[in-house]
Amino acid sequence: MSTMALRRDDTRLAIAALVFGALVIGTTPILVRLAACGPAAAGFWRLAFATPLFAVLAAQGGPAALGGPSRAIALAGVFFALDLGCWHYGIRYTSVANATVLPNLTPVLVTLASWVVFKERPRPVFLVGLVAAVGGAVVMAGAGAAIRPGPLPHIGDALSASTAVWYGLYFMSVRAARQSRSTLSVMLWSCVVGAPPLLLGALAMGEQVAPATPLGWAAVAGLGLAHVFGQGSIAWALGRLPASTASVTVLVQPVAAGLLAYALFGEVLTPLQVAGGALALAGVVVAQQAPAQGSSAGRPQPAASP
C-alpha cells in the first residue's frame, strides 16, 4: 500500500475517532440527568471514576507522566471543576439541547481571548461567525424559555452559557500546560485537582452526594468512562487532523444529546429553537474556519465541551 493511501486511511480513522468521541460526550448530559445525586456530586464522581483510568494510561509514559501538577495544570483543574459544576446545574434547570448547544460557544470565546492575550488577530470572517453564534444562542435560549423546558430555564441557560467561559479558560490553561507535559498527564492531574472543589461544592449546596440507586451509580461510572474515552478519542484525533475539522465535534455532540433527550425524556424542540441552535452551531463552525492572521492554521482548537 502506498504512503498516500496510508495517509488517507489515517485521516479516516482520525475522523472516525473524532465522531466517536463527540457521540460519547453527547451522552454525558443524559447520564447527569440519570445520576441519582446532586449536579456537583455528579461532576465529582465523573472525575473520581476517570482518575484511576487516566493514571493507568499515564503510567505507561514513565514516571515523568505522573509528576505533580504544574501551576497551569492546577488552574486547568479548578476551571474544569467550575465548568462541570455550572454545566451540570444547567442541565438540571433547562433542556438538554440548550445545555449542550450553549457551551459550544467556547471556540468563539477562545479566539477572542487569543486575540487579546496572545495578539492572534482573527480574520474578518470570524466576526460573521461571532454574530451568528451569539445571535443563534440568544434565539434558542429565548424560544426554549417560552415553553419552559426545565424548572428554571433562564438560570439554566445562563449557567450553561457560563460553561463556555470556564471551558475556554480550561482550554487555555491546558494549552499552556501542554508546553511541558503530555496530554494524559494534563488530563490526569486536572481530574485530581478538580474533584475536591466539586465535592466541597456538593456538600456546601446540601446535595445528595452518593447516588441513591444502582442506576445512579451506573450513570456516574458511565460519566467517568465517557470522560476518558470521549475526550481521549477527541484529543487523539485532533492531533492528526486539520484544526478546522474540529467543527465536526460541535455538530455531532448536541445533535446526539438532543435526540437522546427526546427519546428518554420526551424533550421536544420548537422550530425556532432548532433554527437558533443551527445558527449558533453554524456561527461556531465559521469562526473555527478563520485562523488568526499570522498564526498557524493548525492552532489547537477546543474539543467537545465539556
Image: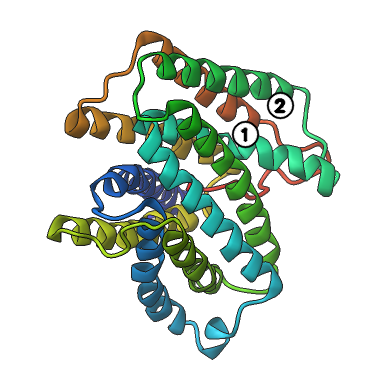
For badge 1, the amino acid type reads Gln
Q: Give the colouring mode of the picture.
A: rainbow
Q: Position of residue 120 (x, y in %)?
A: 81, 42
Q: What is the residue that sits farthest to the right in this orientation?
A: 119
- Report which residue position mark 2 lands on: 126
Q: Is residue 145 above or below residue 237?
A: above
Which residue lies under the disc numbered 1?
288
In terms of depth relative to the viewer, which is nearer, 215 or 179? 215
Figure quadrant of residue 64: bottom right
Instruction: Report if residue 103 is visible in the image.
Output: no
Question: Residue at left 63%, top 61%?
Answer: 174
Q: Estimate the spatial distance between the alpha carbons at disc 2 and disc 1, rounded to whole Å.
A: 8 Å
Identify which residue is drawn at 80% across, 40% down: 115
Task: Pinpoint residue 107: horizontal percent, then vertical percent.
Answer: 61, 39
Q: Amino acid at mark 2?
A: Phe
Q: Who comes first in sequence, dot 2 or dot 1?
A: 2
> Residue at image x 37%, y 49%?
21
